[in-house]
Amino acid sequence: MVRQSAARSSPRTWPADDTAAAGLQAPVHEAIAAAPPVARQLTVLIAVPSLDAGAADEGAVDLVRILAGAGHRPVVVSRGGRRQDDVAAAGGEFICRNMASKNPFTMLRNGIALAGIVRRHGCDLIHAHGRAPGWSAYLAARLTRVPFLTTWYKGFREQNRAKRLYNSVMVRGERVIVVSDQLADLVNGRYGTAWDRIAIIPRRIDFHGFDPATVAAQRVAAVRRAWGVDADSKVILAVGRLLRRKGHHVVVQAMQRLKQRGMKNVVCVFIGEDLGRSRYVGELWDLVQATETSDVIRTAGPVDDLPAAYAAASVVVSAATQPEGLQRAILEAQAMARPVIISEAGAGTESVLAPPAVAEDRMTGLRIPAGDPAELAAALVRLLSLPDSTRWAIGARGRAWVTAHFDAAAAAAAMLRLYADVAGHTAAPRRQRR
């Protein structure tokens, strides 16, 4: 679904179309077939820092699938990573450049190189996923007069004027794509970006893969064994890469409070990836030792069988301390019929139905203030103390909610409509490959 509007009403409701509201579970190719056709095949240059496990990385690979599936030609420029083979498998072309560098001279060289790629490949659009590649892509767009778009997956801190200038490239596109209402408000509030330039297109979720009915008990048992969790223990699954802004330290402090309250048979598992680029992980485990929670906290790293990991959990938590947009993990957890707890910064307000915004019998999870371990502990006690039947009912409502509002087919069709609109307003003729 995509919404672009000249004025904003409040409160906001979406999806914006009846297809998404009906929870249509059509395959993505059916949505692609239903999207408005363009007069010609489009070649899209996608600039992304890396192709590993981040939201931008996954978003770029998803975009390749959408474009290639619709008969368009995606070209991804990135420093690469473990997802780069997925680009070729999805039908895209991969070009390796260090698009993650924040060095101004490297970004300048990348911009000139991208302009050359645009001309050689006859690109019709340039789409940046991230700030460092965004500046290079913006320069290339100016040099070639090709439309420039950006996608926001999270909020960015603006500690000073230099940081604000650096971030501002993300609102310089002809369209600014955001994954949640929360980010749309942030973009408009910070930069005054016109609403008709902001497009809200939620994350794509594979509801067929993330379906509790398709996850065998043996898969769940295997995951719990790998974590060293016995059959009688309830699992709190903490999602997000091991970065400070993901708030794992808040989870540790909350687990300390649970121990102090005498709560038994509860284990917390961190399934985030450690990128090894900060001191945070060392500080985190120092905190685990200081709070004497090493017996109730596990670290599992990236999980190969995510559906089974969610199925093994009683509650899924995101304790992010900075605006995160619309977190895929929270949507996936609800698709797996698991109650969730998110911080007010951790996901778009539209991703979870939580009191007091909705009645207790409609809730799919709880929202807590960002960075507050006492509130997180209270929310965990509340959900874990419920009868299993009540907790599963909350989870079932969560699955019904996200399947009705975050369908992959609807998101794919929305992106194609947006591309068709931007390309349709481009006066320049298609450039031929040399």
Image: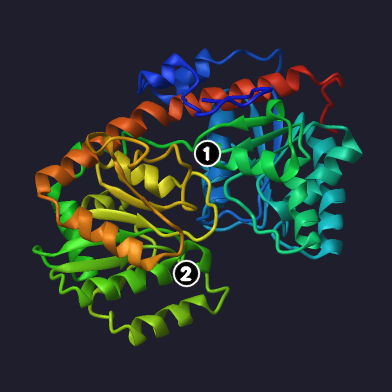
SS category of the residue bearing label 1: helix
Tag 1 or tag 2, which sits nearer the N-term?
A: 1
Residue 190 spot, x, y in % from top left: 71, 46
Q: Is residue 265 visible?
A: yes
Would you say 213 lies left or right of 40 here? left
> Residue lying furthest right in this view?
143
Label 2 sits on residue: 274
Residue 176 spot, x, y in % from top left: 68, 36
Residues 155 and 228: in front is 155
- Please say if 87 is above or below 300: above
Q: Quadrant of residue 67?
A: top right
Would you say 76 lies left or right of 430 here? left
Residues 218 and 273: in front is 273
User: Is the C terminus in the top left, top right, bottom left or bottom right quadrant?
Assistant: top right
Disc number lying in front (2 or 1): 2
> Residue lying furthest front in this view?
356
The answer to the question of whether label 2 and label 1 lie on touching residues, with beta carbons closer than 8 A, is no
Q: Residues within 10 Å of mark 1 (few under 14, many from 20)?
A: some
Q: Residue at x 54, y 28 (%)?
A: 10
Q: Which residue type carries mark 1?
A: Asp
Would you say 168 lies left or right of 245 here? right
Marks 2 and 1 sit apart, C-alpha to C-alpha, by 23 Å
- Please say if 251 is above or below 293: above
Q: Which mark is residue 62?
A: 1
SS category of the residue bearing label 2: loop
Q: Is residue 214 visible?
A: no
Residues 32 and 132: in front is 132
Residue 184 spot, x, y in % from top left: 61, 38
Q: How many marks?
A: 2
